[in-house]
Image (cartoon, rainbow, N blue to C red):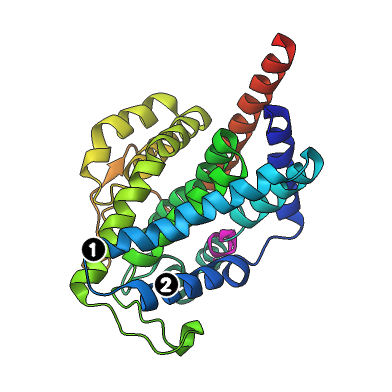
Amino acid sequence: MTLALTFISLLAVLLAEQIRPLPAKQTVVDPLRKLTAWLIARLDGGHKYHEQLIWGLVVLGGTLLCALIYDLLPQVLGFLFGIAVLFLTLGFRHESHYFTDIHFALRMGETGRARDLLAEWRGGRFDGVSADGMARLTIEQALVRAHRNVFGIMFWFVVLGPCGAVMYRLARFLYEEWNKSTDYNAGPMLGVEAAPVLPDVAARRYGEFACHAFLILDWLPSRLTAVLFSIGGNFEDSVLCWRSQAAFWPDRASAILVTSGAGALGVRLGEQDSSDEANESPEVGVGEKAGVDDLQATIGLVWRALVVFLMLLALTAIAVWVGN
């Protein structure tokens, strides 16, 4: 797929999502959960390396299948297939309703509702967290999800076409799914007949492998997103926070995104007052602590980063066209 067609595909899907966003849980997440649960139930025998086999079947198998279909289609159908794949994988509005609803609830002083929404979106408990504390957690989550739902997908779509978007989306799914719980029971809730729950040691092995694999695939995209945040906000502070503070953030997969985003916004994130220690994190960023008033600025930063990405892609496509 040429850069021009890639740009048109991205623009078309972004516009389509604004009109009618895809219900990702029903169309993407639930089927993937059923598939991985079925594979674990039938292939995991309690031995080492089975997590690599199942990861390979889901991620590499899905990627190769997408590449095969794309190569067999004529150019016009291949272009439409790429748009369809991108619409299924890209998720600018998959989770934006959480951000919008939390923002509205905090503005209205409905801290209880904001707390429930944040727990549903991010996971964990937030008893006793102040409104500004929830705003900081919401900003952190928004920066990470903007990358994983949008910029990471777009990067691999530009590099490898539809199969790149599929590869990143599947790897991200397994990273998040296998690290959120040690219970991989493929029981009736997932639509699969009774299957044993993996022992804790096997569950940790699955989660660790999926994390390492995702970090490799996300190494370059996360840094590109950090650069986009820097360009879209305060460049010097963003780069400074990225270089000096990312090593102290507990989650390696989101460290660069949170620190560069905090610097770009000119606010401080982390150091929450939650009763759940899992939600505690070191303070990063510059300036004053982020609060409810900074939620709108976060949306502005993401949009500016998206515009910069599309402009760079468009200019590159024009340069290639003129060069040819």
Q: Is residue 61 magenta?
A: no
Dominant SS type (magenta) = helix
Can you identify the residue that label 2 sits on? 39
The secondary structure type at the circle numbered 1 is helix
Amino acid at circle 2: Leu
Q: Residue at x 51, y 53 (%)?
A: 169
- Tell me if mark 1 has few (under 14), some (14-19) or many (20+) residues whose alpha carbon lies within 10 angstroms of its own: some
At which x and y percent is residue 88?
A: 64, 57
Q: Identify which residue, 96 or 35, lies in the foreground.
A: 35
Above or below, comparing residue 113 to residue 175 in the picture: below
Q: Looking at the picture, which amino acid does disc 1 mark?
A: Arg
Q: Nearer the viewer, residue 31 or 290?
A: 31
Q: Quadrant of the N terminus?
A: top right
Q: In the figure, is residue 100 to the left or right of 267?
A: right
Of residues 292 and 220, which is closer to you in this image? 220
Q: Residue at x 62, y 45 (%)?
A: 162
On the image, the x and y values in percent for residue 290 come to 39, 49
Q: Quadrant of residue 30?
A: bottom right
Above or below, 183 relative to 280? below
Q: Nearer the viewer, mark 2 or mark 1?
A: 2
Q: Which residues are magenta?
A: 95-101
Where residue 289 appears, as percent x and y from the top left, is 34, 47
From this viewpoint, is residue 198 visible?
yes
Q: Quadrant of residue 210?
A: bottom left
Residue 14 visible somewhere in the drawing: no
Q: Secondary structure at mark 2?
A: helix
- Quadrant where the C terminus is found in the figure: top right
User: In this picture, is 295 found above or below 228?
Assistant: below
Of 60 and 224, which appears nearest the observer? 60
**Relative to 121, residue 139 above or below:** above
Q: Which residue is mark 1?
A: 205
